[in-house]
Image (cartoon, helix red, strand yellow):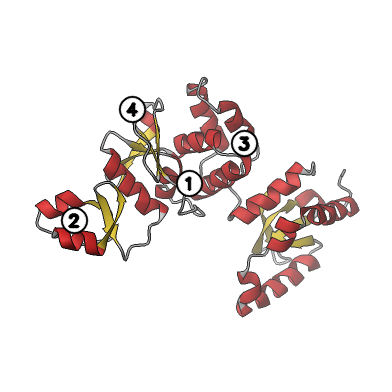
Amino acid sequence: MGAGDAPFRGSSAIVAGVLTEHQLYHDFARLYQGVYVSKRTPVTAAVRARAAWLFAGPDAVLTGFSAVALHGSKWIDVSEPAEVIRPGHRMPVKGLLTHDYRLEPDEAIVIGGMRVATPARAAFDLGRRLPRPEAIVALDSLCNATGLKPRDVVMVAERHPGARGVARLRSNLVDVDGGAESPPETHTRLVIVDAGLPRPETQIPIVGNDGWEFARSDLGWREWSVLVEYDGEHHWTDRRQRAWDIERSARIEALGWKVIRVGAELLYTRPDELIRRVRAKLHAAGAPV
């Protein structure tokens, strides 16, 4: 207690003689009442989840962003509150969402000694609570990390037909795709889908004339040989990455693929221009757009 980087109960550390009160208040930060972590420790979603579980007690089950962090999902905003399912009504606690949800016994597992919602149950809780873009980003990331499929979440929804937000969840699941490897990839796909264009496939393998796969494209349409590639900042600032991108693009286009490259500025400030470019490429390739 107190010696490592994991959250711990301050009173237990003092009683065990691991820390003095002065050390506790000087060297450690309080995350929740009675629960502390070293000031040197970055407070990630996983760290906040453990702290929340210690605070809420052993009958609590971590869900939402807390659960997906422990299942290995990436791209979680560290400012998101921890989430637990705990019977009975509780006073509001800063940085913690407490839900009085009905939970089936097989909808929770144990990770690191803590009770945690399964990926399907965590997706069920997030997908019915969050607005559409945020929900789909979170569920894409969870599916990518765990292999979860939308149909697995539907099975949980069928067990809880009267739960609040189930209709929203079912609508969100239609657009979930675990092939997305970052939020901008999800956002790019949603812009395309929401414009009424054909739904793209994700992570398309690119095979050279020698029969070997040398690349995977973020998304596109094999039928019309059109690809959409999102270039994050490192594609422009890393010299080696940029050199490979140029070589990779030349090889892909030599195979007959048409490529639309997307950056943050185009995606987030000029989405209409992005759609115009995609539509033009698809139209030229014979797609019914």
Foreground: disc 3 or disc 4: 4
**Marked residue nearer the N-terminal end (2 or 1):** 2
Query: Quadrant location of the N terminus?
Result: bottom left
**In the drawing, what numbered circle is on residue 146?**
1
Residue type of the residue flagged with mark 4? Pro
Residue 98 is situated, as x and y percent measured from the top left of the image, at: 39, 35
Q: Which mark is residue 172?
A: 3
| Residue drawn where x is 52% and y is 23% of the image | 158
Camera-near label (1 vs 4) is: 4
> Viewer-proximal residue, 80 or 153?
80
Mark toward the start of the polypeptide (1 vs 4): 4
Q: Is residue 69 left or right of residue 165?
A: left
Crowd around label 2: few <14 · some 14–19 · many ≥20 (10 Å): some
Closer to the camera, 105 or 29? 29
Mark closer to the chain start, 3 or 2: 2
Question: Looking at this view, is 212 or 273 the one in front?
Answer: 273
Residue denoted by label 4:
87
Q: Amino acid at mark 1?
A: Thr
